[in-house]
């Protein structure tokens, strides 16, 4: 029994030391993006908005692993911009459901144009992900447009459905979103 208590105490000490060491590690924005499963630009935007604390080394941002983990824990909370794109995602999903053939034609056309502009990097990876979604069951596309998980947030920020909802529809969705947020 004493040995089991000793072993448990040692595990706790090792865990605490490891956690302390990991929390002091500084990550680049690219490394932080890989940990969160988002684009590097999204991490930079989080830093610029004050949602993710950072230090500078020269001109480069460095993010403490502990701060990154804290953000990850609260990732269920959507930022205002993410909520806004979620509302737009629901509007787009409605159009996809109403006329899947037309919606997917627009998405494929836009995807082709975007792939010509973005030949490498994180943007290209999200376009590749959209290609896989567009090739699969329509439910995968709808999930990406309406889910609150981190992957869907990034996909919505890089979606190929531009032009599917009209400028007037987009304005009405954003007006409704603004009114809803203001009333809360």
Image (cartoon, helix red, strand yellow):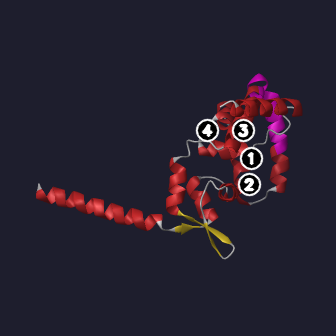
Secondary structure mainly formed by the magenta segment: helix
Q: CA distance from mark 1 to mark 2?
A: 8 Å
Q: Residue at x 83, y 47 (%)?
A: 112
Image location (x, y in percent) of residue 62: 60, 68
Give the answer, above or below, for where 120 lies relative to 55.
Answer: above
Mark 1 touches mark 2? (CB < 8 Å): yes
In this figure, which residue is indicated by the disc labeled 1? Answer: 158
The stretch of residues the image draws in magenta is 95-110
Q: Earlier in the sequence, mark 1 or mark 2?
A: 2
Q: If the image is split into quadrants, where does the N terminus sit?
A: bottom left
Q: Earlier in the sequence, mark 4 or mark 2?
A: 2
Mark 3 touches mark 1? (CB < 8 Å): no
In the image, farthest residue toward the bottom: 58
In this figure, which residue is indicated by the disc labeled 4? Answer: 148
In this figure, which residue is indicated by the disc labeled 2? Answer: 123
Give the answer, above or below, for where 18 lies relative to 87.
Answer: below
**Which of 146 and 74 lies nearest the eye of the viewer?**
74
Q: CA distance from mark 1 to mark 4?
A: 15 Å
In this figure, which residue is indicated by the disc labeled 3? Answer: 84
Number of other residues with Cα within 10 Å of mark 4, as a class: few under 14, some 14 to 19, many 20 or more:
some
> Given this view, does label 4 or label 3 mark the residue nearer the observer?
3
Q: Earlier in the sequence, mark 3 or mark 1?
A: 3
Q: Residue at x 84, y 55 (%)?
A: 117
Q: Earlier in the sequence, mark 1 or mark 4?
A: 4
> Given this view, does label 4 or label 2 mark the residue nearer the observer?
4
> Given this view, does label 1 or label 4 mark the residue nearer the observer?
4
Left or right of 33 in this view: 21: left
């Amino acid at each position: 029994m004493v040995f089991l208590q000793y072993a448990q105490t040692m595990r706790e000490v090792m865990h605490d030391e490891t956690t302390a060491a990991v929390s002091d590690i500084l990550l680049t924005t690219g490394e932080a993006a890989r940990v969160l499963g988002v684009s590097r630009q999204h991490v930079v935007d989080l830093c610029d908005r004050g949602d993710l604390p950072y230090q500078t080394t020269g001109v480069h941002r460095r993010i403490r692993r502990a701060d990154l983990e804290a953000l990850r824990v609260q990732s269920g909370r959507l930022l205002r911009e993410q909520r806004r794109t979620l509302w737009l995602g629901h509007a787009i999903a409605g159009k996809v459901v109403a006329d899947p053939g037309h919606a997917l034609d627009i998405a494929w056309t836009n995807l082709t144009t975007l792939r010509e502009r973005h030949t490498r990097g994180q943007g290209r990876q999200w376009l590749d992900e959209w290609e896989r979604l567009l090739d699969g069951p329509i439910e995968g596309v709808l999930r990406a447009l309406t889910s609150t998980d981190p992957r869907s947030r990034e996909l919505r920020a890089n979606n190929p459905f531009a032009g599917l909802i009209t400028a007037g529809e987009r304005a009405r969705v954003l007006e409704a979103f603004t009114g809803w947020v203001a009333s809360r």
